[in-house]
Structures are given as C-alpha cells and as structure tokens.
Amino acid sequence: MKKPVPNSHLNDLESYKGGKSKVDGIEIFFKLSSNENPFGPSKLVSNAYIDALNDITVYPDPSNNDLIQKLSDFYSLVPDKIICGCGSDEILHLLARAYLGGNDEAIVSENCFAVYPLAIKASGARVVRAKEINFKTQIQSILDLTNNATKMVFIANPNNPTGTMISYNDIIELQSKLPSNVLLVIDEAYAEYVKDENYKNYFELVNNNSNVIITRTFSKVYGLAGLRVGWAYCPKEVIEVLNRLRIPFSVNSSAQKVAIAALNDQKHVSDSVKHNAIWLSIMEEKFKGLGFNVTASDCNFLLIEAGSNLNFSAEEIYEFLCSKGLIVRQMKEYNLSDYLRITIGTEEANKLVISSLEELLK
Ligand SMILES: Cc1ncc(COP(=O)(O)O)c(C=O)c1O
C-alpha cells in the first residue's frame, strides 16, 4: 500500500530540542538551560495577564495593532515596518519560507542559534556555515562565502550559544558589501543585556535599506518565554510577504496585552539587566578559577568548556549539577560536547552552581 511521503528535503531535518526542564527521578530547583529571566515577569505583567482572561473567548486582533503601536512609540519606529510573531522563531521561519527555495543558500555563523539551520533546511535551501575566530562571527568569512546562490544571512548579535557579539561597524560593513538582493537578518534576542548605545542605530539600518531585518523577543529579559511573543522591524515589502504567509492569529490575545504591560515596566528590565551584569562577571571569574575555559559573554548566559585540565567531562559535570537540582544546557546538538551553557540565575541559583562545582572540582 502506498504511504503519504513528506517533501524529500525534510528527511534529514531534526526537530528543535529546547533546554531541558526536567530530569527523570531528580527534583530540579533551578532551570538554567534556556536563558529565561530568572525573576519571571513583573507584578504589572502578572496583573495584565489576569486581566487578559476577560478576552480569551474572542479571537485576538490579527494585526496586533495595540502592541505594534506601543513598540513604535517605545522605540520610535515606523509602525508599518513592525511585525509580531509567536516568538521571534515564527518570524525567522517565515522569512526562510518566504525568501529561500531549492537552489538557494543561506549563510550562518559556525556556532549559530540552532533555529536558523532548521528554518533554512525546512525551506529546502542549503545551510552554509562561516568560520568563526574565538567563537566570534567573522564578516569576512561570510562575505567570502557569498555567491549568486546566497539569498539570506542570519546573524544573532549577540549570539546564542557563544554569547559573543560583533561591532556596529562590522554590521555596517557587512551590509554595505552584501549584494542588495541578499536579506541580512540581525537577531537581537539579547539586545537588552548589551551596554551598546549603537543598538538604536541598527533600526536605522532598516529604515535606510531594503534588505535588513531586525528581530527582537519578549522571551528573554522581559520574562515572557512561555507566552511566545517576538517581533521584527523590516522593510514594508517584507512585511507584506510575511503577512501573506503567516497564520491569522499567531500572537494570542493574552500575549498581545501582556507584552504591552511588560514594555511599560522598564524598572523590571533594568533591575534584571543590573542583576545579570553583576552575576555574569562573578560567575565568569569563578568558572575560570575552577579551571573552565570561559567565553566572554554579552548575554545572560556563559558558554564554558570543560578542558583537559579538569578531571571531569562536560557530561559528568552536567549529571552532577542535575543531582544538585540544577539543570544547565548540554551542547551536543551544537557539536560542542565538551561545553556547557549556563544561564545566569537568581542569587540563590548562582551560589548553588558555584558551591556545587567547587564540591566536585576542588
Ligand atoms: C538568538 C536567539 N534568537 C531567537 C530566540 C527565540 O526567541 P523566541 O522565544 O522569541 O522565539 C532565541 C531563544 O533562545 C535565541 O537565543
């Protein structure tokens, strides 16, 4: 009997594996595997969520009007150039579906965010990885790989899982040297954690060019990963194409309301950023002191390598931390099996990470 057969380009596509939230037989106290805000949402946001309950019987506004207006006011952006999605993941996938096909190539950095290769392959196109130096995206290696088949470049700035970022000048140079038919997607999921005044200028790049897209998310510092809201600033023509593709109500009504409340509570954002900055440098020093190789990070996580000077493998360290109720991210699916990625948590979580590692390694 004949069976339904999916498109052949989907055969070697694996599904996305997020950070684990449980481990069989172990009570996990702190999830440090997906770079969420350890404080969760603010009080204002919780109240907005309860309030949003009144709306769940009717379909949400398919155009996300109020949220777009709020984003436009807050960041001084052109509202017609903003699109919201069910997480920025939805927008990344829509972009790949809309602009890539069978004979195309899309360039990503060697250790890029895992969603890009999935979205590229799902569209039938080829993933081309540009070499990094010290875990840093290199614009020259991207330019060297650009050819007639190249249709998109995805860069997370700063990047997950490495935590590294490239300068505003590098981005400007890359944009100016890329052919104008190549879409440059700059994913700023961790922007709020970066102390770089140039960030507001990236939006100008969208205003001044027809091939630049910036994506942002409410999943990280805003503490709304479970609600699934992301957005992008894009040329109008891109928005029109994405609007044809997207499902009508991908951002639910609670998500739309709560994201507005989250933007209204910038104190929560700045408190979270301050906490992160303090603990990022403490954790970096402690990890180094324990013998890990640590990549300097501009995000809310650290990528650490269990090098040959440690008596335990990354796998063994992961298992030990789990036994202490701490779940961090293994890096096997990124082909970095000697590494772990650890999200900066609450003070209590961070102290438990440090004391657990000291117990194991000292
Ligand atoms: C670089 C990067 N981009 C995008 C996302 C996805 O964000 P969202 O939750 O908005 O889909 C993540 C989540 O881990 C990320 O690390």
Image: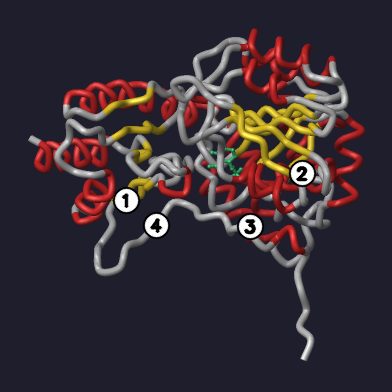
Element marked by disc 3 = loop
Query: Dot 3 corresponds to which residue?
Result: 13
Name the residue carrying label 1. 327
- Can residue 79 be seen here? no
> Real-space Cα distance between discs 1 and 4?
7 Å
Label 3 vs label 2: CA separation?
Answer: 15 Å
Circle 2 residue = 96
Residue 310: which numbered mark, if any? none
Q: Amino acid at mark 3?
A: Leu
- N-terminal label among 2 and 4: 4
Which color scheme is applied?
secondary structure
Between residue 233 and residue 128, name the one nearer to us. 128
Mark 2 neighbour density, 10 Å: few (under 14) some (14–19) many (20 or more): many
Question: Disc 1 versus disc 2: distance between alpha carbons?
Answer: 32 Å
Tell me if the residue at label 4 has its CB under 8 Å from ligand 1.
no
Residue drawn at x 22%, y 46% as measured from the top left: 317
The residue mark sitting in front, 3 or 2, is 3
